Amino acid sequence: MRIIETIAEWKLIKRSSRGSWGLIPTMGFLHDGHLSLIRRGCSENENTIVSIFINPTQFGQGEDLAQYPKAIESDLEALRREGVDVVFLPSTQEMYPSGFDTLVVPGDLAIRLEGRSRPNHLTGVATVVCKLFSIFQPDRAYFGQKDFQQYLVIDRISRDLNLGVEVVLGETIRSSDGLALSSRNSYLSDTERLAAGILYQALTKAHYLYRNGARNCKDLKDAMMSIINSEHVVSLDYLSIGNVETLDELEVIETTAIITIAAWVGSARLIDNIYLSE
Ligand code: PAF
């Protein structure tokens, strides 16, 4: 496994490589959710590259940029075990050299949900992912369903800007109580960790009601809220039932929908979602 820190090193590797490349962009502190994307990347491409970069432009003022967890040695060990070919560990200066002055601003898909709660977050994500696509020109790039809006935005950008990267959605990996794996779960105290399971309980309740014929979004949201409100350490940021392609808010579900939720559990802001489909 090659560990590189500069774009110049990558150019030399690319020049002598053969076959397809799969890219898995990460911010490190890898868990089974990342590993599942990496395994898929390894199985669908001849070569795999994983980037580890805590991207400052996607964090707002007062967010957790300085505290974001890091575990570079164990990350590298895990990547070695998975058979990844290249790991890209750039400095902030390598990604954003002085004078950097260009942002990729996604459109309507990014104004709701995360876009409303974390202004500029998706612009920061879009900018760094566009840079990674342009540096590596991978055949495929892998993103987890937990960040569904992020996936939709990146897929849109890849098509709109003809980046030629197939954007692949990987499943959400969950712990035994259903909590979606996330690096930010490490912020939770034991009590908060137990309480956080309520988010998936609320999502599965809505899924159950949907499977039994419920189609009215207010009814589904009321049922979810009564579960979420039973946990005092959980404070809801948003709950949305939207169109799976546009995220437009729905009143009645015709066929499919995506329920997305964001909540504060102590100092951790967690997001999750569930896909409803007949
Ligand atoms: O999902 C993440 O970890 C980040 O948003 C990403 C895609 C690596 C961009 O920094």
Image (tube, rainbow, N blue to C red):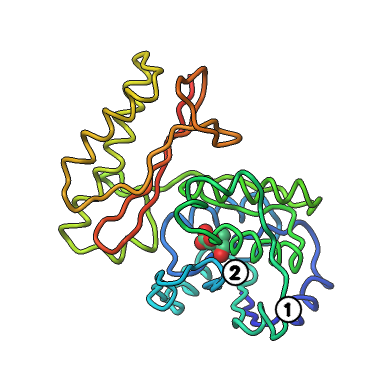
How many discs mark residues in the rendered view? 2
Under mark 2, the amino acid is Ser
Q: Is residue 84 left or right of residue 156?
A: left
Disc 2 secondary structure class: strand
Three-letter residue code for mark 1: Ile
Give the labeled residue for mark 1: 7
Give the mark nearer the N terminus: 2 vs 1.
1
| Vertical side of 220 occupied by 236: above or below | below
**Residue 70 image offset from top left, x and y in percent:** 42, 76
Where does the image place residue 106, in percent across and percent down from the top left? 66, 52
Residue 17 horizontal side relative to residue 224, left or right: right
Q: Residue at coordinates 45% horizontally, 27% vertically from top-left?
A: 276
Q: Nearer the viewer, residue 51 or 244?
A: 244
Please provide percent x and percent y for residue 277: 48, 24
Vertical side of 26 occupied by 229: above or below? above
Rendered residue at 44%/74% (across/down):
65
On whether ligand 1 comes within 8 Å of the CB at mark 2, the answer is yes
What residue is rendered at 56% in x and 52% in y? 143
What element does badge 1 sit on? helix
Comparing 214 with 26, the one in front is 214
The residue at the point 74 percent across, 81 percent down is 9
- The residue indicated by pointer 2 is 51
Residue 237: image location, x then y, percent:
35, 49
